[in-house]
Amino acid sequence: MAVAARIDPKAYFEPQEWAPLARRSRWKGLALLAHAWVVIGLAMAMAVVSPWWLKPVTIPLAIMIIGGRQLGVSILMHDAAHAALHPDLAINDWVGNHLTTGGLIDYRNYHLQHHKYAQQAEDPDLVLSAPFPITRTSLRRKIARDLTGQTYWKQRWSGLVSRIVHRKPDEPLWPLVKAAIWGRRRFLAGMVVTVAVTAPFGLWWVWPVLWLVPQATWLPMISRLRNIAEHACVAKDEPDPLRHARTTSANWIERAVIAPYFVNYHCEHHMFMHVPCYNLPRAHRLLAAKGVLPGMLTAPGYLSMLRVATARPAAA
């Protein structure tokens, strides 16, 4: 197997520069996670308390904000997978398992393979970037499937339904249902608790509209855009470790609804995968000052990257 080339931080940083970058704060990662959940709560509150005539504006806005922070929670779980959310590994893993999207250990085992074989044939995420560039029509179809919930259904539920519907005639149903419930216990518990708390106040719609809809529509779309920006049009078997992933400049709106918690600094993340996300902007500035940036894979913005990713001409 071809292991992706690695970078020695000493090649770019003096010890006094590297030490602050590699240091894991006892509070910064936890503060970012608290920020994500507070923003979700405030966005929900905005949609709930707004008058009925303003809800056609506040509910779609809340869906975008909440979906962006749902991605943010996943990003912070990703930091926990790299043991970068907290310096105490026990706290890091507990928070990553219980206060984010969960499934930390399985995700860590999968994701570290992506780093080990980045853009090589054995990279488990290579299938996501391999089709690019695609046509604009193809991207529009993908985004339409994301925003209408089709992608979410396919990824989260269609396999289960198919497994139940097409089970063998003598295969009992309950073990399949039991396994499905257990595997989705966090999702189901969140639904039951939220509806139970909000329904007595006439707010039963909060969970389906302000949690499930963002999760099923906006989140899949921005996750797709994030992945395109990070790895689309990166050469397979790329030997240069400065070009295994792409860093994309993000303005404040993009950081709010598409690229939270410094996820756009993806080249730096692949170069130094144990650096906490909140230190990646500093790493970027130091690399720029040292003249390293021109050799790295970068994009001036998400729109410009989408133009590159959709450069394939439509069939005649």
Image (cartoon, grey):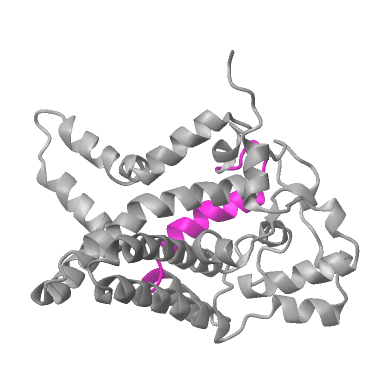
Q: Is residue 190 above or below residue 33?
A: above
Query: Is 122 located above or below residue 8 in the figure?
Result: above
Query: Residue 298 location, x and y as percent?
Result: 75, 52
Question: Quadrant of the rendered structure where residue 10 is?
Answer: bottom right
Q: Which residues are magenta?
A: 97-124
- The residue closer to the viewer here, 217 or 292, is 217
Quadrant containing the N terminus is top right
Percent of width and height locating residue 282: 74, 74
Between 50 and 283, the residue placed more toward the observer is: 50
- Examine the image and state in which quarter residue 125 appears: top right
Q: Residue furthest front?
A: 53
The quadrant holding residue 270 is bottom right
Farthest-out residue, right: 291
Quadrant containing the C terminus is top right
Residue that sits furthest to the top in the current view: 316
Residue 69 seen anywhere in this rendered image of the structure: yes
For this view, does 171 lie left or right of residue 143?
left
The reply to whether the magenta stretch includes residue 120 is yes
Residue at 63% x, 80% y is: 24
Q: Is residue 314 magenta?
A: no
In the displayed structure image, the side of residue 90 where residue 243 appears, left or right: right
Q: Position of residue 108 (x, y in %)?
A: 51, 59
Residue for point 63% across, 51% down: 302
Count of numbered tags: 0
Q: Residue at x 57, y 71 (%)?
A: 83
Residue 253, percent across and down?
A: 56, 64
